[in-house]
Amino acid sequence: MKSNKNISKSAQKYLISLLANTEDKNKLFQLIEAIMTEKEQEELINRIRIFAYLQKGTTQREIRNKLGVGIATVSRGAKAFRQYPIDDLFPNLNSIVDNDWFYSWRQYNKSCNQLVPYIGN
């Protein structure tokens, strides 16, 4: 019988493979909607936005004020920013802060409850 750790690792590998091999953006949106709650998606988006602001040299307090999140949230993002090669992992982050289009992928068309497709570069 497989251990929970092995099952979790298998599920993680499956998810990464699925996301990496999905070229249809609408399907990616649906996958994210299916596996993450709205709150989890907000947290993920904020983490990436924190990286973008840190990359631009924005202070943690300024980031907290811009995003309306707690200082602990920004601090955890800053810790990850220091631990990983964010510039390589997330190219062109400055466009997120400059245009702030990234946040719009979470917007819904309220009348028909459908995800508004991402329109970007």
Image (cartoon, grey):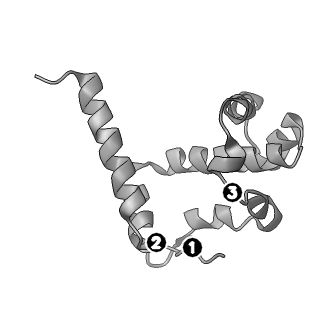
Q: Which residue is mark 2?
A: 25
Query: Where is residue 51, by image quadrant?
Result: top right
Residue shown at 66% from the left, 61% from the top: 103
Task: Using the image as rendered, state which of residue 62 and residue 95 is in the foreground.
Answer: 95
Q: Which residue is mark 1?
A: 118
CB of mark 2 within 8 Å of CB of mark 1?
yes
Q: Position of residue 52 (x, y in %)?
A: 76, 50
> Looking at the image, can residue 1 be seen?
yes
Q: Position of residue 29 (x, y in %)?
A: 45, 65
Q: Amino acid at mark 3?
A: Pro
First reached walking from the N terminus: tag 3 or tag 1: 3
Disc 3: CA contacts within 10 A as few (<14), some (14-19) or many (>=20): few
Residue shown at 41% from the left, 58% from the top: 20
First reached walking from the N terminus: tag 2 or tag 3: 2
Nearer to us of marks 2 and 3 is 3
Nearer to us of marks 3 and 1 is 3
Q: Is residue 98 above or below residue 73?
A: below
Residue shown at 44% from the left, 78% from the top: 112
Query: Where is residue 24, by image quadrant?
Result: bottom left
Residue shown at 35% from the left, 48% from the top: 15
Residue 67's tag is none
Q: Amino acid at mark 1?
A: Tyr
Left or right, residue 52 beside residue 14: right
Classify mark 2: helix, strand or loop: helix
Classify mark 3: helix, strand or loop: loop
Q: Point out the image quarter for the C terminus.
A: bottom right
Q: CA distance from mark 3 to mark 1?
A: 18 Å
CB of mark 3 within 8 Å of CB of mark 1?
no
Q: Which residue is mark 3?
A: 91
First reached walking from the N terminus: tag 2 or tag 1: 2
Q: CA distance from mark 2 to mark 3?
A: 18 Å
Q: Point out the image quarter for the N terminus.
A: top left
